């Protein structure tokens, strides 16, 4: 008679052994076929992929005057897998003019996935951005002492004058949201944040290039991989010509100094915007380089709201300019003629409704109603339009006709201007 407990124990041991073998097979399968950690490690030892950034497109006014251009700057990049424990921190900080505390915080921030979602210890990460030429030249002399740190040449925006800040916008470092939305970007890249810099970002930014460099076992650059066969040259961004007249824009901003409001000048034949002034404004040249964040915070806290583009971001009633559209509607529909006169006794009164008006002669005809901006005249015009049963049958039909006229003149919808 067989021992039941012994048989049971044999099955348990066999099951455990089988499970261990299965776990090892799954792990080997994952490491060799699914995981790219070891491949990245090997590639990072053999290759250095150096991103080459394109020149951002310049911006001109309608007469060919240069408004925005580029100026060289330098980013300090770090590959964590190469830099770990291999540099003299104090000497490095001295070369860049930073404190040890800043160095430690920055290195920790780079490795923090919540702040830097694209982090990889095998690829270049942004350590410090937009060094001007004078700061970079001092650091360049000592860079060979800091393994894992590299220099990436970039360009930053420069503005020819202080006008047009709200139109032109500015460029700043990408946010985690920008990276998530568009795979073109990686941490440390720059993107248009406001104005035409944002609206035409894809046209202005160009296309990145890449250089694949070969390294030896000690990490020293040996030259291009396969003589640059797999390199890709950057494609410069496209230049942009605006409808804005820079001289007219400057005049408008001068007229609005010390005031709150907006000036917009259009070419009525084409709808082109010749100038768009929002006051108070700011000098776009302060939104460049590492000082941008500090200056942006100061502008955001300013009680006068200089970041608000009052031309397109404010919500205002159309005011008396709306009356000309009413006059055109009533005349086209045959409700009034230029000689039609309506009463005005300090406003329009009808069944408890009162729309006030200032003092002027009455009754009043169309031309004088426009010149004196009479509220009562245009209220009477709408009253007789809604009440015209022979023409519209119902007040609903009359209001639909009125609405169609307003829509045809652009009321009730977004402006359609190519600014965010």
Image (spheres, helix red, strand yellow):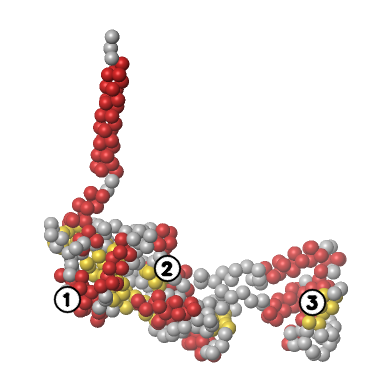
The residue that appears at 47% across and 69% down in the rendered structure is: 199
Query: How many discs mark residues in the rendered view?
Result: 3
Q: Are marks 2 and 1 in contact (CB under 8 Å)?
A: no
Q: Are marks 3 and 2 in contact (CB under 8 Å)?
A: no
Give the SS element for disc 1. Answer: loop
Residue placed under numbered mark 1 in the picture: 141
Q: In front: mark 1 or mark 3?
A: 1
Above or below: residue 306 compared with residue 116: below
First reached walking from the N terminus: tag 1 or tag 3 = 1
Residue furthest to the top in view is: 1
Residue placed under numbered mark 2 in the picture: 201
The residue that appears at 50% across and 81% down in the rendered structure is: 302
Residue 80 vs residue 162: left or right?
left
The residue that appears at 64% across and 76% down in the rendered structure is: 316
First reached walking from the N terminus: tag 3 or tag 2 = 2
Position of the N terminus, as image quadrant, is: top left
Q: Residues within 10 Å of mark 2 (few under 14, many from 20)?
A: some
């Amino acid at each position: 008679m067989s021992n039941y407990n012994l048989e049971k124990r044999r099955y348990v041991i066999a099951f455990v052994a089988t499970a261990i073998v299965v776990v090892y097979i799954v792990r080997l399968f994952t490491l060799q076929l699914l995981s790219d950690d070891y491949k990245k490690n090997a590639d990072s030892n053999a290759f250095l992929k150096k991103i080459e950034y394109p020149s951002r497109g310049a911006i001109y006014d309608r007469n060919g005057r240069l408004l925005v251009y580029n100026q060289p700057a330098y980013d300090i990049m770090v590959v964590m897998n190469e830099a770990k424990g291999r540099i003299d921190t104090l000497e490095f900080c001295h070369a860049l003019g930073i404190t040890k505390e800043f160095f430690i915080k920055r290195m920790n921030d780079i490795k923090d996935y919540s702040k830097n979602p694209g982090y990889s210890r095998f690829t270049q990460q942004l350590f410090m951005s937009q060094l001007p030429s004078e700061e970079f030249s001092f650091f360049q002399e000592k860079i060979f002492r800091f393994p894992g740190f590299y220099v990436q040449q970039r360009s930053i925006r420069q503005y020819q004058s202080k006008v047009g800040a709200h139109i032109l916008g500015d460029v700043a470092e990408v946010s985690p949201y920008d990276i998530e939305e568009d795979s073109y970007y990686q941490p440390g890249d720059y993107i248009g944040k406001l104005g035409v810099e944002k609206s035409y970002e894809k046209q202005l930014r160009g296309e990145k290039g890449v250089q694949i460099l070969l390294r030896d076992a000690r990490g020293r650059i040996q030259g291009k991989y396969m003589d640059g066969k797999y390199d890709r040259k950057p494609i410069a961004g496209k230049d942009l010509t605006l409808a804005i007249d820079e001289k007219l824009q400057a005049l408008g901003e001068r007229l609005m100094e010390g005031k709150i409001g907006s000036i917009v000048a259009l070419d009525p034949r084409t709808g082109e915007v010749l100038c768009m002034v929002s006051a108070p404004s700011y000098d776009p040249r302060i939104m460049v380089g590492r000082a941008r964040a500090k200056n942006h915070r100061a502008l955001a806290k300013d009680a006068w709201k200089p970041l608000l583009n009052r031309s397109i971001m404010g919500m205002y009633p159309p005011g008396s300019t709306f009356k000309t559209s009413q006059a055109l509607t009533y005349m086209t529909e045959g409700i009034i003629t230029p000689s039609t006169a309506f009463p005005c006794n300090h406003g329009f009164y009808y069944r408890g409704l009162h729309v006030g008006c200032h003092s002027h002669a009455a009754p009043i005809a169309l031309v004088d109603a426009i010149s004196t901006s009479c509220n009562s005249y245009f209220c009477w015009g709408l009253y007789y339009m809604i009440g015209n049963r022979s023409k519209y049958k119902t007040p609903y039909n009359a209001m639909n006709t009125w609405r169609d006229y307003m829509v045809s003149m652009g009321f009730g919808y977004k402006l359609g201007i190519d600014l965010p």
